[in-house]
Image: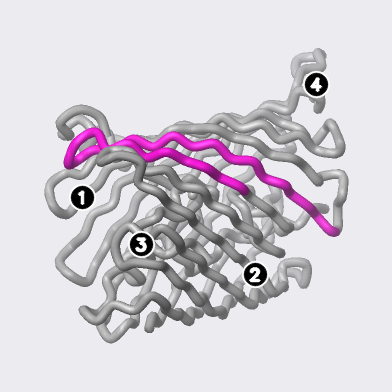
Amino acid sequence: MIKALVALLVACIASSPLDAQVRTPPRKAPTATKPAKPPVAEPQAPPVTATPRVPTATEPGKTAAKDTVRQASRWRPYGFSAFTAEVFDSNINREREDPTRANGFVIGGVARYQSAESRPGFAVAYEAARHTYTASEQFDRISQNLSVVLSRRLTKQVTAEAIGEAALKGSSEDRDVGNQFLFLPRLNYRLDAARRLRAFGAYRIRRYETNPDRDAANRYVGAELRSDIGRHSRVEVGYRYETNSARSERRSYVRRTYSTGLERSFGRNDDLFAELKFRSQRYPRRLVEVDDEDVPRHDYRLTPTLEWNHRFGAGFSLIANYNFENRTSNDPDNGYLDHVFALTGRYDW
C-alpha cells in the first residue's frame, strides 16, 4: 500500500510544470485565506480532531477545512461548527508487545472569525472538545485551542503571516497530551498561477503536568512547495528541521521531517487527502547499547494518512480517516505499529 501511495505521489509531482502547501503541523498553522485552526508509563493521545487542516498535522479532519471555506453565497465574518468523532486505536499506549486496543469518542465545537472573505488580514478561532477512551482514564480530558492569524500582503507575489496558538491538553504531532504555546511567522511566495513556495520558522513552549522533565523549548524551520494540477488536484512536498531542548537532557532531540501529500476533489461534494511523512529523530544525550557499544538513540517513524470527506449539503459533512504509524529504533524496545480509524460528523453554520 505504501509503495503504491508513494508511486502515485511521485507521478503527480512529475506531471507538474516544475516542482510542486502544508501542515505546517503540526498535527500543520492556519493560512490567511482560511479560518484558523481551532493549523493534541507516558500518556500519548490518539490523533483525533475534527478541526480544519493545517500544514503539519496528521490528525483526522484534514479535508474538513474546505467545509468552512465553501459557505453559502451570503458571506458572514463569523462561523460556528459542532462535531463528534468515533475512534478506534489498535495500540493506544504505543507498545511493542501486547498492544492495548481502545475505542474513543470526541465531541466539541468551534467558533471562528475572519475580517474578510478573501485574504483576511485577521482571523481567530477557538475550539473546545471532550475526549473519552475505554482503555484508560489518562486519555480522558477536555482540550482547548485558541489560534490567531495576522496577514499582510507585501507585494503582488509575497504575503507575510504571523500565527499565535495556545493549546491546553491538546495533542501534538507526537500524540502526547500537554499544553503548548506557539509563535509561527511564515512567508508565502507565489511562483506562478499554479505553484506556491512557503518558508516558515516557529518557537514552541511545551508543558506537561504529569511529567515536568519533558517540559521543553521547541524550535523548527522549514519550507513547503505546492503545485496545483489541473482544477481538482494539488500536490505538496515539505521539509522541516526541528530541535527540542527539554528540561531533562535525555528528552532533548533533533528531528527531520520529510512530507508529501495529495489533495483531490471529486465533484462538488467529495475530497480525498493522502499524505506520507517520514521522521528521523535523534537523542544526543540518550544512549542505548548496540553491538556492545553505547550510541545515541535514533528513531524513525513512517506515517501514511488517508482521508475522505463527503459533504451532504446544508453544512453537514462526514469525514473518514485512517492513520498508520510504524516506529523503528536502534533501541528495539521502542518500536511499535499502530492503526487509527476515525469517523467524524461535522456541522458548520
Give the label, 2 or 1, closer to the camera: 2
Q: Mark 3 or mark 1, which has the lower sequence index?
A: 3
Q: Secondary structure at mark 3?
A: loop
> How many angstroms separate mark 3 from mark 2 (CA)?
21 Å
Q: Relative to residue 257, is residue 235 depicted above or below?
A: below
Q: Mark 3 or mark 4, which has the lower sequence index?
A: 3
Give the label, 3 or 4, closer to the camera: 3
Q: Amino acid at mark 1?
A: Ser
Name the residue tied to disc 2.
144
Give the label, 1 or 4, closer to the camera: 1
Name the residue tied to disc 4.
289
Name the residue tied to disc 1.
233
> How many angstroms separate mark 3 from mark 4 (CA)?
43 Å
Name the residue tied to disc 3.
63
| Label 4 packing within 10 angstroms: few (<14), some (14-19), many (20+) | few
Residue 293, given in percent of the width and then of the height, sits at 80, 13
> How many angstroms separate mark 1 from mark 4 (CA)?
47 Å
> How many angstroms separate mark 4 from mark 2 (CA)?
41 Å
